[in-house]
Amino acid sequence: MSKAILVAGGAGYIGSHVCKTLAMSGYLPVTLDNLCTGREDFVRFGPLVKADVADTAVVRATVMKHGIKAVIDLAGSIEVGESVRDPLKYYGNNLAAKIAFLGTLKECGVNAFVFSSTAAVYGEPKAVPIPETHPTQPKNPYGWSKALFDRYARRAADAGHEHPRRAVHQAVGVGVLVTTNMPWPLMLRSVADVVCWVVPFCAICWIVSALTPPAL
Ligand SMILES: NC(=O)c1ccc[n+]([C@@H]2O[C@H](COP(=O)([O-])OP(=O)(O)OC[C@H]3O[C@@H](n4cnc5c(N)ncnc54)[C@H](O)[C@@H]3O)[C@@H](O)[C@H]2O)c1
């Protein structure tokens, strides 16, 4: 199995820490990022491919070059207020671009895909902590763009489960992480680091391992 994992949005706030954790776990994080909000100097643990997730040719070439078998997707537009002012930007970047991305990955035979969702998909939660079974009812275009791609990706994965022998070619296995707000100061305290970063990222690595098929 390839030790390279493609991290879309790896130059961002969460993505840069995912890359760090992957590197500490013995993986090579290959960052795919168009740097629209990310920072080049955040990419310290593997190569940076400066491109949009919707750039089919670059995604295909990157997957081939690094033997990518698994993807962690943290790329996206994330500001609720901006999404209300400019909803088409959010449906374009968080839904249309991601559908193109998932399609390219499927064509390339990548069938392990971890998607970073958001608690905004639940709108006003009826219970806290929010259970996985809570109905989704987003209150803004940001939440809707994430919820719609979440559903699209799950349906793509379900299609693969119905035809397990052809799943590698026909669909992409999908794991969805619902991320809650994590303020910057928490990153500076060691105990909080363990709670906020190490545990969730171990979970990410576990999900990637679980979704990645053994080498043929
Ligand atoms: N930060 C939080 O508290 C939080 C909470 C809930 C969910 N999330 C989710 O986690 C993910 C990462 O959030 P973040 O806080 O690190 O945001 P961020 O803005 O710091 O990182 C996003 C990264 O994606 C890149 N990007 C955006 N669109 C792209 C595209 N089309 N192609 C390639 N790269 C692109 C940006 O340049 C940036 O580096 C997002 O999907 C977000 O919805 C974050």
Image (cartoon, rainbow, N blue to C red):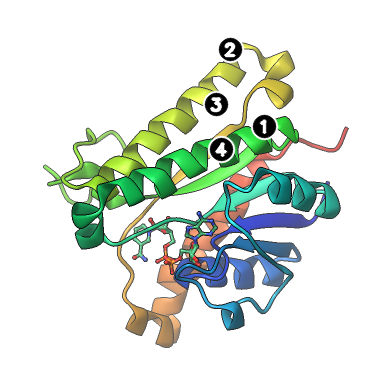
Label 1 environment density (alpha carbons within 10 Å; few <14, some 14–19, many ≥20): many
Quadrant of the rendering where the C terminus is positioned: top right
Query: Which residue bears the numbered disc 3?
Result: 157
Residue for point 19% across, 37% down? 137
Please report whichever mark, 2 or 1, sits nearer to the chain's N-terminal start: 1
On the image, which quarter does residue 79 sit in? Answer: bottom left
On the image, which quarter does residue 32 sit in? Answer: bottom right
Q: CA distance from mark 3 to mark 2?
A: 9 Å
Please provide percent x and percent y for residue 186: 35, 80
Of badges 4 and 2, nearer the viewer stands: 4
Circle 2 SS class: helix
Of badges 3 and 1, nearer the viewer stands: 1
Q: Is residue 157 visible?
A: yes
Query: Which residue bears the numbered disc 1?
Result: 106
Query: Which residue bears the numbered disc 4?
Result: 100
Ligand 1 position by quadrant: bottom left
Please report whichever mark, 4 or 2, sits nearer to the chain's N-terminal start: 4
Q: CA distance from mark 4 to mark 2?
A: 22 Å
In this picture, residue 87 sits left or right of residue 68: left
Query: Which residue bears the numbered disc 2?
Result: 162
Circle 1 SS class: helix
Q: Is residue 131 visible?
A: no
Q: CA distance from mark 2 to mark 1?
A: 16 Å
Eyeballing the image, is 90 above or below 38? above
Q: Are marks 4 and 3 in contact (CB under 8 Å)?
A: no
Q: CA distance from mark 4 to mark 1?
A: 10 Å
Q: Nearer the viewer, residue 102 or 213?
A: 102
Please provide percent x and percent y for residue 44: 67, 79
